[in-house]
Image (tube, rainbow, N blue to C red):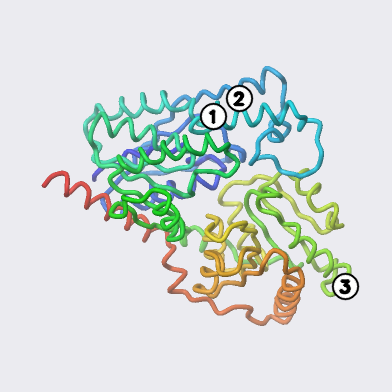
Amino acid sequence: MKKLLMICHSFPPVLDVGALRPAGFATYLPRYGWSAVVVTPKHPDVAMGIAPEQTVFPHAEIIPSTSWNPVRGAMRIFGMERERFRQFHPILRNDDSPSPARSSLGIWMGRLIYNWLWIPDRANGWYPFAVLKASQRLLQGDIQALFSTSGPLTSHLVALRIKQRTGLPWVADFRDPLVEEVFSPRRRQLQKRILAGILRAADRVIMASEELREIMLAAFPGHEEKYRVIYNGFEPDLLQSIPKDLPSQFTLGYVGSMFPGVRDPKPFLQAVSELLAEGTIPRDNFKLRIVGPSPLFCHHLVQPFGLEPVLEAPGPVSHLDSLKYMVQSHVLWLVVPKPFIISAKIFYYLGAGRPILGVAPLGGSLDQLLQQTGMGVTLAPEDVAGIKRVLIEWYRASTENRPILRPNREAISRFDRSRQAGALAQFLDELCHHVTT
């Protein structure tokens, strides 16, 4: 079996959505003649933490490496708790309310760290240790190709260094554009130069959606022949093993990270609040489930809408438990801020088989996906009345045991992780054949 060296900053048991895509490849690649050798940090700095159980990959070799994060060290020195430090971060902070942690000095420090110390990103302290571990493993002489996935971009820089040393075929996988609007203009230019170097050196560049491919082509023209698309997906065998029992109360489930101001749930929460206040949906027959963010954050989020009595907030959970919460909800909902974004969790929502209500720009990637699969509807963020209308309709259908949707099973099956691993294996085989001929 051929061996693929995978450079992954996020990998199970990390509770991070970025860990799921490489984990899916590592799980199913052996079906196509490839096994994974994964270089990943021992204690990566992720917002979601570590799963309580260890995930086992019987056909993969996991190589843990040291990762040094000076910001984490500063947090320990100054006795700063993780939730307080998040207030300095322009993306990770999770509320809009005034906070002592968000003083002018604190915001200045956060911007300094984010723009000029985390270059190219917060994982830069992992780079030398990952290069060392990968180089040591390469000495065994049995690696046929390289794979790296981002964010963070540091994973690609590790692979770039290995590519320069060995000349091995390299597939660079992108889950998002990686040039964030929160960067200063100079920092965005620096990030673009780094990205351009990666795109020149990689033999194949995989994008997680057609829309992302178009964005990257527009920003970095001249590499069209390298770009391919492999969507995110789900593991059908894992989802099928979960009991389909639904709670007695009509349950709206949200699973994953939530960043108000970036992914703003307020219009959805306003619609739910109005429905309960009007009595259209009885409070005693309703549950609002938010899985992933801390319970304290969830209570703070829903309190202005009077939804604390109907809130279920278990906090961060393992991947398997997150799937159980999806399957055992009547309706799944999510918020997408931009037309080209397709959140990775939407594919697990599809696999869970529950109706999906997306609060997102109409005509965007999520809207098109839900139309193609027949798994839900998309409503504009400002359309509170529309959100209420759909929820009323679905609540009545649920109480009357009527089907809500007519799923397109063939369209949904495109996102089976096994099929996606097969596509990656095909790209790898093509590259290796080209090298040997």
Q: Secondary structure at mark 3?
A: loop
Residue 266 in percent (x, y) is at 76, 57
Q: Residue at x 88, y 72 (%)?
A: 278
Q: Examine the rendered structure and indicate whether residue 26 appears above or below residue 343.
A: above
Q: Residue at x 64, y 20 (%)?
A: 74
Of badges 3 and 2, the one in the foreground is 2
Residue 31 falls in image quadrant:
bottom left
Mark 3 or mark 1: whose residue is earlier in sequence: 1
Mark 3 or mark 2: whose residue is earlier in sequence: 2
Mark 1 or mark 2: whose residue is earlier in sequence: 2
Task: Decide which of 384, 107 is in the foreground and name it.
Answer: 107
Residue lying at the far front of the rendered structure: 185
Left/right of residue 335 with respect to residue 38 in the rendered view: right
Q: Look at label 3 and name its amino acid.
A: Gly
Residue 215 falls in image quadrant:
bottom left
Residue 118 - label: 1
Q: Look at label 2 and name its amino acid.
A: Val
Q: Examine the rendered structure and indicate whether residue 260 appears above or below residue 246.
A: above
Q: Examine the rendered structure and indicate whether residue 237 appears above or below residue 433.
A: below
Of badges 1 and 2, the one in the foreground is 1
Q: Secondary structure at mark 2?
A: helix
Q: Look at label 1 and name its amino acid.
A: Trp
Circle 3/circle 2 CB separation < 8 Å: no
Circle 3/circle 1 CB separation < 8 Å: no
Residue that carries the numbered disc 2 in the rendered image:
71
Residue that carries the numbered disc 3 in the rendered image:
279
